[in-house]
Amino acid sequence: MLSKIAAAAALLLAFPLTTAPASAHGARVAPLPLGQAVQLLPSADESRDGYQRSSFKHWVDADRDSCNTRAEVLIAESRSEPAIEAGCKVTAGEWYSYYDGVTLTAPGGLDIDHMVPLAEAWDSGASAWTPARRQAYANDLDADRSLVAVTARSNRSKADQDPADWQPPLADARCTYSTDWVATKLRWQLAVDDRERSALTELAAGCGQETVDYQPAP
C-alpha cells in the first residue's frame, strides 16, 4: 500500500499545477475531487498552547481605501447594491448566510467568519508563522472562500470548531462548507488531525462531484 507521502505525490502527478497566472500568489492548482483533496492535507497533532486571538490582527484596511476587511466582505457579498455611508460604513444590502439559509438586509446581524477559525489555524500550523503572515491570513481577501458573511448566530455556534465537531445546520450547505474548508487549509498549508480528516473524508463521500480549486497563499 502506498504511504501517505507516496499517495500525495501520486495525486500531484495526476493533477499537476497549472501555468502560474500573473500573480504573487503562485500557480493555481488544477481542480481536485474533494475526496482526493482531503488526502493532500498534511497531518499533525493540534496544539493551542500560546494562542491569543490578538495574535491575528484583523479587520485592517490593507489597501487604505477607508474600507476595512469586514466592510470589504460585506460589499463583495451583498446580492444588491449596498448602502455605504461616509467612512465606508455599510448600512444596508442583501446577504445570504449559506450556513443556515437565512437572508438579511441589515449588516448588524452578520459576522464575517474565518472559514478556518483563527484558533483552529493556530492549532494547525499558524503558531509558527510570523505576525505579518497571521495578519495576512486573518484578512485574506484574495480567496473568496477564506472569509464569509453569515448570521452571527451560526458563526457563534461554530466558534472555533472544526468539521469533526461542527457542520452547518443547513444540510444542503455541508458539501460547500467542507469544500471551502479544505480549500482554505490547502491554500495556507494548514494541517488536520485524525478526527478532522475522518470527518472530512466522510463528508466528501456524500458530496458527489464537488471539486476543490485553490491558489496557494504567498
Image: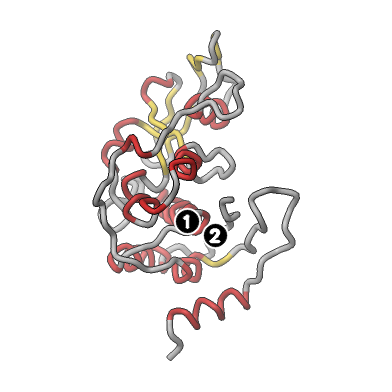
Q: Residue 178 vs residue 211: left or right?
A: left
Q: Position of residue 194 (x, y in %)?
A: 30, 68
Image quadrant holding the N terminus, namely bottom left
Figure quadrant of residue 56: top left
Residue 188 in the image: above or below residue 75: below
**Residue at (26, 57) in percent of width and height:** 47
Relative to residue 199, is residue 211 drawn left or right?
right
- Tell me the amino acid under the disc marked 1: Thr
- SS type, badge 1: helix
Residue at image coords 50%, 59%: 186
Identity, as a three-letter code, of the amino acid under mark 2: Val
Say which mark, if any, is on residue 212: 2
Outermost residue on the top side: it is 86
Q: CA distance from mark 2 to mark 1?
A: 6 Å
Disc on res. 179: 1
Residue 48, x across and y down, in percent = 25, 51
